[in-house]
Every structure is written in structure tokens, then in C-alpha cells.
Image (cartoon, rainbow, N blue to C red):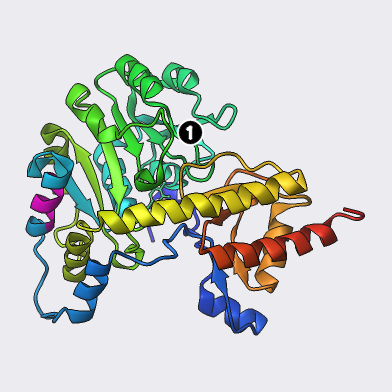
Amino acid sequence: MRWNARLEGMRAYEPGKTIAEVKREYGLDRIVKLASNENPFGCPPAASRYLKEMDLETALYPDGYSTALRSALAEKLGVSARQLLFGSGSDEIIVILARALLSQDDNTVAPWPSFPQYRHNARIEGAELREIPLKDNRHDLDSMLRAIDENTSIVWLCSPNNPTGGIIPDDELRAFISRVPEHVLVVVDNAYHEYASAVDYRDPVDLIDDFPNVIVLRTFSKAYGLAALRVGYAVGAEAVISKLEPVRSPFNTTVAGQGAALAALGGDEFIRECREKNERGKEQYVNFARKHGLDCPRSEANFVLMEIRGTADHVAAELLKRGFIVRSGDKLGTPGYIRITVGTEEDNEALLGALAEVLAHSVPGA
Ligand SMILES: *Cc1c(COP(=O)(O)O)cnc(C)c1O
């Protein structure tokens, strides 16, 4: 077959192991999955009610334009309905952006370590990838700026950044964007927006009025607890969104996804409670790190990066045997660390108990 040569050596995304897989492999009854930054508290009550009561006409296609969700979300964000693009998760928005803007004639600038889908989709489109290492755990915006030239199509930013958890302060973000040439689309991947609480963090959607070359990616998969239903969206200038709309597939969000996301939009109180519980959960991890003399940088998201002793793959494998699924930093670009999703208080406590045990065994005399 005449495969696209760019697919040579590419591998499928490796998700964290599923609960069923781990139960089977290790003969365990109870598994705690803290690997994919899902919300341990579920979704807003109105969304679960919608899902329980929905009477789905399965033979009919969904509304391809997500009209009801679109107008409610536009109102909530204070933007026009034509400033929104919906995707099967924000993962699909990344695919759409890459298809629309990247080719073998382009380059794209991205931070690393960061969300691996920027690099993955750049490779599929054959664009030159210019990855700029984080500096002191933060986007190195000066180096990113220097990497931009007349053939740059997209600059990716991730704030809060997955897997390191830090944000880009609003003043730095504005100073950066004002120096990016207008032909470059600046993508702010904002999947953890609802969790960010740093004093120098601002809603990046506010940037769009001042900088029409900015697009912000959000999702219902993380704080809104609807990862199973695959709804993400982009907010941008109407001129940008109208170029992207023809690239998405016609029915890329489902009836259930649109309905649950719409119901979830009223869940401000739920989101506020989750943010508070998440803050307390992060304290459990930070206290553990302090007690054990480990690094655990401040995270503005619902996961933490925890330094370990020994190799991250080993520690993650040992935790797995004990029924805890986390992500090894060896696969995320953060060797020496594991990424742990902040769970319920009890699950955090249990995981930290297991981690203490693993660390005690993995380092002789520690
Ligand atoms: C989880 C995540 C996404 C993708 O989420 P979807 O479920 O596809 O909406 C995008 N970006 C970052 C940084 C993420 O962590």
C-alpha cells in the first residue's frame, strides 16, 4: 500500500491502562486510576440527571452545528456564536488546527515537555517541529519567539501546562503575543482553566479581542467531568473560526455529548466545589513531598508532578501492582517524576501510603 511516508515509525497514542486491564493483569479488586486527569467527583448534577433521563432517538444524526450548546456557551463566555468551534474533545480541535494550517512547507513551535498531541499532529502533516524546552518549568517565551520565522504557522502554548502544571502569567502572555507576527496562529491550550487560581492568571479568552490571531482550547473532559462524551471547543475570532469550520467532520459531537455539556454549563457551584477539593488534595501531595524531601512544583491544574527516587517507570509499575494507575514521567518528558491526578481525599491518602512504601523499597536505606 502507498502509505504516507510521514507515518513511518509513528505509534498510536498510549493511554494510561484501563481499570479493567489492571484488575485482570494483577488480580486486584479495587483500582484507583489517577492517570488521565479526569474529575474524581464526576460531572455537574444537572448533567448526570440529563444523562439518566435522556430518551435518545438513536437513528437520527446530531445537530452538526451544536446550536443549543453553542448559543448557551457563547452567552456564558460573552462571545458571539460564530466565535466557537466544537470538536470531539479538544484533541480533535488540535487535529483540525494541524490539518488547516500545517504542511511540509510550514514549521510549528511548541513547548516541551507539554501535551504530546501538538508534536504528533505536526508530524502527521509533515511540518517542521521546533520544540522549545521549558526553562525552570515554565514556557521559555523568548526562545519560542526566536524560533518563529516567516514559515511558522502555529505556536502552541499550554496554560496550565500538562504535565508540569504551571501557567503563563497574563502580562508575559500579552507581551509575547504582541511580538508574534500576525500571520502566526497562537493556540492557548487551556484544558485546565477551571482549576487555575494563581494571582497572575487571567482568562485567556479575553486576549482574543486584542489579538485576533489567538485561539483558546477548552474541554468538558476535565473539570466538567464529561471525558467519556468527547466535547471540546475552541474560542477565536470569527475570521479564524470560519476558516476552521469546513475542516471538521460534519457530525463530530454526539447528541448525548451536546446535551450533557449544555446541562453542565449551569454547574458553577459544582466547579467551585471541585476546585476547592482539588486545592486541598494538592496540599496532601505537597505535604508528602516536603516530608520526604521530594520536589513537587506548584500545580494550577488537577494533577501534580511528584519527584521520585529511582526511575519513574519502575515506581509507576510498583504502584500499578498495588492497584494505583499513574503516569510515568519517562513517557511524558519528565524523567525522575510521576504525574498523579488529584483524586478524592481517601484515594490520595491511599496512593501516598503506597508511594511511601515503594520509595522505601526502591532506595536502599531510604
Ligand atoms: C486532556 C487534555 C486535552 C484533551 O482533552 P479532550 O478530552 O480531548 O478534550 C487537551 N489538552 C490538554 C493539555 C489536556 O491535558
Q: Who is closer to the viewer here, 303 or 185?
A: 303
Q: Who is closer to the viewer here, 299 or 69?
A: 299
**Residue 70 among magenta residues:** yes
Under mark 1, the amino acid is Pro
Q: Label 1: which residue? A: 111
Q: Is residue 266 left or right of residue 70?
A: right
Give the magenta-colored segment's residue range. 69-74
Q: Which residue is found at the position 60% from the left and 53% from the top?
A: 284
Determine whether 155 is above or below 123 in the image.
above
Q: Which residue is found at the position 8% from the left and 51% from the top?
A: 71
Q: Who is closer to the viewer here, 121 or 22?
A: 22
Residue 170 pos. (x, y %): 36, 25
Residue 168 pos. (x, y %): 43, 30
Determine whether 324 is above or below 64 in the image.
below
Q: Judge: label 1 CB < 8 Å from ligand 1.
A: no
Mark 1 crowd level (few <14, some 14–19, many ≥20, 10 Å Cα): many
Identify the main secondary structure in magenta.
helix
**Residue 190 among magenta residues:** no
